[in-house]
Amino acid sequence: MKHLLVTNDYPPKIGGIQSLLWEWWRRLPADKFAVLTSPYEGTAEFDAGEPYRIERTREPVLLPHPWMVKRINDLADDVGADLVVLDPAVPLGLVGPSLKLPYDLVLHGAEVTVPGRLPGSKQALAYTLRRARGIIAAGSYPAAEAEHAAGRELPTTIVPCGVDPDRFTVLSDSQRAEAREHFGIPNDAEVIIGISRLVPRKGFDTAIRAVNRLKHRRPDLLLVIGGTGRESERLQRLADELDAPVKFMGRIENDDLPRFYGCGDLYTMLCRNRWGGLEQEGFGIVFIEAASCGIPQVAGDSGGAAEAVAHGETGLVISEPENVQDVADAYEQLLDDDELRRSMAIRSRERVETDFAYDVLAKRLGDALGVYD
Ligand SMILES: Nc1nc2c(ncn2[C@@H]2O[C@H](COP(=O)(O)OP(=O)(O)O[C@H]3O[C@H](CO)[C@@H](O)[C@H](O)[C@@H]3O)[C@@H](O)[C@H]2O)c(=O)[nH]1
């Protein structure tokens, strides 16, 4: 079977959903699908480097207009597709019931949680979900949210976020020392790495307050935060006001990402629910990237994060992620116990290889979309 993927979120645009879709789709046979997506800076160069067909719309965002239905129908005809795959379910996916071909929906989290809990949009989402041929859910959390919104069971395949274990590898002691030197991190520091888009949900304010609470007892402790976002300035101000042991790195180059994780003794992101649960963490690809590098993770319990981090096995999941003392205790528990960190590092890596390697996940996606039929 051949399909057309229609999405607003595709590289070279940066972000969790963009990189997830690319990591999944680039592993499928190139002659079994085409992509329709929005334009972005640098697309010509990116598209030329991909072995499958990519079409870009002229308008910056794909929305569920009648002419979008026509555009999708025409392109699906042109590529000889049997199926259309829509991402996200709302608003773009609402075109699904009007298409000529059957359609699947890709679900990540927020796009089903929010409309699924608001009257009005809930009905439109439920209708779109019920009419879909299949659902590809990036974790059990969006799968459960979708069934809640649809009011019944759905034909769902769960394909969680993953990682390339050959790219995100465990560093040797000497490689770690080199990496720390490269990023200007003292080699004898106790390092907690945090990297993500810097938005309120990711909870880096709590991480800053927690290391601040520990700084007198642990003079070598350093929280190193990578990434950018609308919280950047507020977080820097908070760290300055507290005089907390925090180093901000800004955006990390893609090629540098694995060795940035590898600088850490721990990885942390204290993701939390906002707006009464309307905003939650979809999954937390960053926890799996850290796990692949053999770095134990300290997460906040929000959305799918407890699926990404196996509590007590690969790290710790904090049930009240805004509780600074709980977070500080978790950091200390792991930093004080070399043996526990070592066993978590080994378990993290094993779990990545069996459950979260993109090659394993792409095969599951391909089976669900019938590309090998
Ligand atoms: N190179 C680079 N990559 C970065 C940087 N900051 C973040 N990233 C990368 O961006 C990706 C996702 O980052 P997050 O900030 O954690 O996630 P998100 O954009 O909110 O993604 C959403 O969708 C994901 C996929 O379904 C979910 O896993 C995630 O929970 C969330 O819902 C990860 O691969 C992370 O390494 C940076 O400075 N540099």
Image: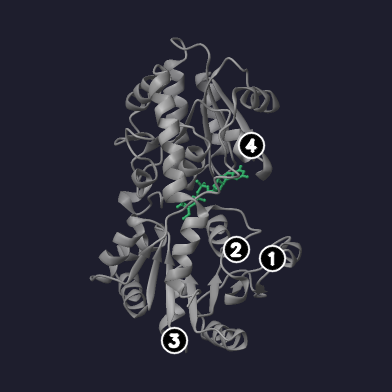
Q: Dot 2, crowdedness within 10 Å: few (<14), some or many (≥20)?
A: few
Q: Name the side, left or right, on which 305 lies relative to 92.
A: left
Mark 3 or 2: in front is: 2
Q: Which residue is mark 4?
A: 250
- Choose between 123 and 223: the one closer to the eye: 223
Q: Which amino acid type is shown beneath numbered disc 4?
A: Gly
Label 1 or label 3, whichever comes before in sequence order: 1
Q: Which residue is mark 2?
A: 26
Q: Name the side, left or right, on which 314 lies relative to 60.
A: left
Residue 113, position in %: x, y? 35, 59
Find the distance from the CA under tag 4 to the CA under tag 3: 44 Å
Label 4 or label 2, whichever comes before in sequence order: 2
> Which numbered disc covers residue 98?
3
Q: Name the side, left or right, on which 24 lies relative to 271.
A: right
Q: Are marks 1 and 3 in contact (CB under 8 Å)?
A: no
Q: Secondary structure at mark 4?
A: strand
Q: Are marks 4 and 3 in contact (CB under 8 Å)?
A: no
Q: Residue at x 43, y 75 (%)?
A: 104
Residue 150, position in %: x, y? 28, 71
Q: Dot 3, crowdedness within 10 Å: few (<14), some or many (≥20)?
A: some
Is 367 drawn above or below residue 230 in the view shown?
below
Q: Secondary structure at mark 2?
A: loop
Whether disc 4's CB lies below 8 Å from ligand 1 is answered: yes
Is 62 drawn above or below residue 113 in the view shown?
below
Q: Residue at x 61, y 84 (%)?
A: 79
Q: Are marks 1 and 2 in contact (CB under 8 Å)?
A: yes
Q: Is residue 89 visible?
A: no
- Choose between 238 and 126: the one closer to the eye: 126
